[in-house]
Image (cartoon, rainbow, N blue to C red):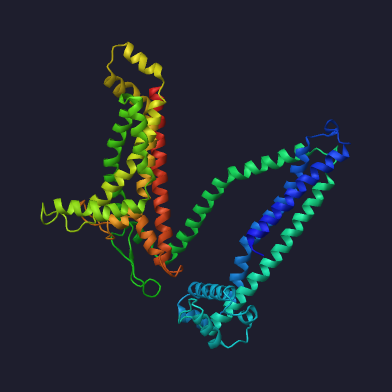
Amino acid sequence: MPLLWLFLIVLAIAAVGFVLGRARALASAGGDVRNLHSLPSYYGNNVAIKTVVPAILVMLIWLIVQPMIVNSTISGMIPESSVAENSSLGLVMSEVRRTADGLDNAVANGDMTEAFARDARADFTDVTQRLKDAGQIVTSDVTQPILRAAQSYRIMNATGNLIMSGIVLALALAGLLWGLRDSHAAFRARNTVEAAVRALLIGAASIAILTTIGIILSLVFNTVEFFRLYPATDFFFGTSWAPSFSGRGGSSDLGVLPLLWGTFYISIVALVVAVPIGLFAAVYLSEYATPRVRAVAKPMLEVLAGIPTIVYGLFALLTVGPLLLGIFGDDGLGWMQAGTAVMTAGLVMGIMLIPFVSSLSDDIINAVPQAMRDGSYGLGATQSETIKQVILPAALPGIVGAILLAASRAIGETMIVVLGAGAAAKLSLNPFEAMTTVTAKIVSQLTGDADFSSPEALVAFALGMTLFVLTLGLNVLALYIVRKYREQYE
């Protein structure tokens, strides 16, 4: 049964339970609401909650656990010779899943029967030829063990989904009966429903924390595995980035310093562009602009935040790069050899960050109490003096937060760097040379069917962990500075 249908059936059972639970509670009270402990809707909600929650929880757990069990079982069926031919078990399992998808599509399109797709005695050549004739992707890597594993993969998934559907529907019906049994006048339905809602709110509040913990743990485990294969000292202090894709690493040089330098260099250029323009725009909009001008200018400025980053990347590649090359290239000053450079990516990224700085700074400046402005004017200060000596110091903690948000956005940007800055990992002070960043290399290292047990793939997690620690340290330092300044100001 498709997952969507199963979910809708559970919701339909819950809706029926709500109506029956409410009616049953009223009937037990003789039709008089005053004889009930709770309002009738609480009794209906009690039935609906007991119907939906256990069924959905089991469904979610099943969907998480089943792929682990299936993959573990199928990987044990694949002979070592097939793994050796494809260099890693991960690549073999990818081919198994692609072949299984091809079988599913062939059955769905009527190109072969379900019985034939499942038949383990079917001729290997016949099955693969039918898949090719049906237009399904079957490469030369598909061998007879992979095909048999794909057939078993489909069977196990189909059987697991069938069992899950039966258990989920049984739990939904059991929850319905349980809720109906409690639908009587003396039952404290309101207490039960409010406790369930409280648990739901706690779970929702915990999602962010659990997600953060999961991200950190995934980075930590893979980073530790990387440092078992590659020396940490060479990674953190190496000045060369030259990964080798032969074997299990070969003589790769995976020094992170060139990538960190490119990341911070491009981010600094972007902040030099975005912070002054964004801050001046925020001061103008909040202190000088008329309501009519502000109503038009601020939405137009914030439109920049809605442009996809790939569009900014194309703008850097097709417009800004050639423009800078015409000025600083061989026909101009001779400083620039190609359109992809730190300056290209930094300028475009700075344009992208302007609305982050201006919009947040504008809201922060407007939050400064009007009494502070009036007091400054009352002491004889001009408007510019009031802005410089009263408003900006009062809004400084929030403005620092806006700049940090823009910096985090710059450090994590990928598409503008890929298209505008190039892919060269180098240590250089020349802003007109091509460089790359940590995020761009993370993408390149994980693109394609990589062997996740090799340093070339695991290094992406080490890069991510390094960037995470650095940005966290910068945020903590900035928070400390802001708090110290706020204490002095107050």
Q: Is residue 47 left or right of residue 213?
A: right
Residue 481 visible in the snapshot: no
Nearest to the observer: residue 192 or residue 327: 327
Q: What residue do we see at 47% from left, 61% from top?
A: 222
The residue drawn where x is 50% and y is 57% is 218
**250 displayed left or right of 76:** left
Q: Is 150 above or below relative to 121?
A: above
- Quadrant where the C terminus sits is top left
Q: How far across and how far down the image is residue 2, in percent?
A: 64, 63
Left or right of 462 on screen, residue 160: right
Q: Position of residue 403 (x, y in %)?
A: 35, 38
**Looking at the rendering, in which quadrant would you find the N terminus?**
bottom right
Displayed quadrant of residue 302? top left
Count of number-bearing discs: 0
Q: 347 and 392: which one is in front?
A: 347
Q: Position of residue 136 (x, y in %)?
A: 50, 76
In this rendering, does residue 66 appear at all?
Answer: yes
